[in-house]
Image (cartoon, rainbow, N blue to C red):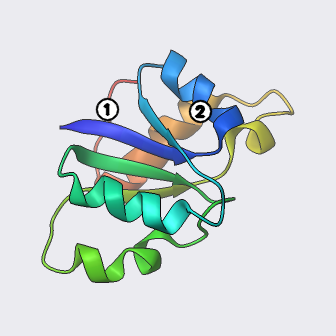
Amino acid sequence: MKIGVLTDAETASGYRIAGLEAVTATADEAAKKLIEMIQSNQYALVAVDQNLLTDPNKAAERVMRGRNSPVLLSLPNLLDSFSGGGDAKAYMRRLVRETIGFDIKL
């Protein structure tokens, strides 16, 4: 199983460089793309850009009924969050640890 990120086209490059699979979408098509990612059964974790979907759990509530995976993680757009020089890697590790309860190596 993979880790996937649903994000805009501009931010997707950074995730791909980090070795994650990035699916691009606009705000209008984000819910549909998220549902496609869930139904593909390829992902253990799907991180969703908050600029696309503020509440991915609500957007995917119907399709997630009865499923344990993937874990849905809402995160701020990295370009917006770290334009001031913050530590993106530390932020992501903390966010994943808080969401799923343990560290993963990024």
From the viewer's side, name the closer residue of 102 and 80.
Answer: 80
Packing grade of label 1 (10 A; few <14, some 14-19, many >=20) is few
For the N terminus, the quadrant is top left
Residue 63 sits above or below residue 2 on the image: below
Name the residue located 54 percent from the left edge and 61 percent from the top edge.
30
Give the alpha-carbon distance from disc 1 to disc 2, as whole Å: 20 Å
The disc label shown at residue 104, or none = 1
Question: Circle 1 — which element?
Answer: loop
Name the residue located 17 percent from the left edge and 51 percent from the top edge.
41
From the viewer's side, name the closer residue of 40 and 99.
Answer: 40
- Residue 31 percent across, percent down from the top left: 49, 68
Name the residue located 65 percent from the left edge and 52 percent from the top edge.
76
Q: What type is the residue that disc 1 sits on?
A: Ile
Question: Circle 2 — which element?
Answer: helix
For label 2, the residue is 12
Residue 52 sits above or below residue 80 on the image: below
